[in-house]
Image: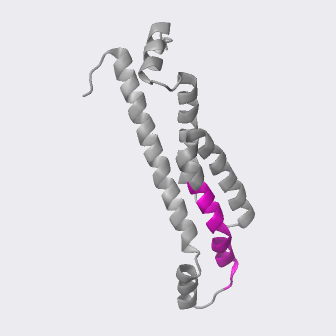
Amino acid sequence: MAQPSAATLSAIASALGSTDLPSFLAEMDADRLLLAEIRKDLPQKRDEADAYMKRLKELAGKADPADLVPKVNRMMEQAPTYYDYLEKNIQNQNDAQNEYAVGGARGFLIAFQDLQNAVLLTVINRLEIAEHALRNAAGISPG
């Protein structure tokens, strides 16, 4: 595959505006890794969940710290209640549903869904920026 010329790279960097190309590419890489992480099943054990959430926070800090890190923090705040719920031995289905809803365990899953949606929006926005930059660099008008 042919390498892009310096002029092409310069045009792409210019089209990105205030974002420099290496930083933009690092953010896109973090986006890609975040997408892979949020597709995984949530860990069922507390210690695995702690490691998983730390990984999410690390990637969120690289991808979009202002928007994504607070969402991971919210997830981390809700995690103890959720994992306490999972560790309880509730025999009655009604009691289990009540504990899940009223006891606060569902807050963790709501926070996780909020994070998933925010990650998707971040990726969509970054792809739009990349498309715009590439179109400008190539002299192609939006289609």
Q: Bounds of the magenta span?
A: 71-89
Characterize the magenta stretch by its predominant secondary structure.
Answer: helix
Residue plotted at (34% across, 22% down): 135
Residue plotted at (57% across, 90% down): 95
The answer to whether residue 68 shows anywhere in this view is yes
Residue plotted at (58% across, 84% down): 99
**88 displayed left or right of 109:** right
Q: Residue 21, relative to residue 93: is it above or below?
A: above
Residue plotted at (54% across, 40% down): 31
**28 displayed left or right of 80:** left
The answer to whether residue 42 shows anywhere in this view is no
**67 displayed left or right of 56:** left
**Along the line of sight, the residue nearer the viewer: 80 or 19:** 19
Place of residue 5 in the rendered image (x, y in percent of width and height, measured from the top left): 48, 8
Place of residue 39 in the rendered image (x, y in percent of width and height, measured from the top left): 53, 53
- Say which quadrant the C terminus sits in: top left
* Magenta stretch holds residue 75: yes
Q: Residue 52, relative to residue 90: is it above or below?
A: above
Residue furthest to the left in view is 143
User: Residue 80 is drawn in which quadrant?
Assistant: bottom right
**Along the line of sight, the residue nearer the viewer: 140 or 40:** 140
**57 displayed left or right of 112:** right
Place of residue 42 in the rendered image (x, y in percent of width and height, measured from the top left): 60, 61
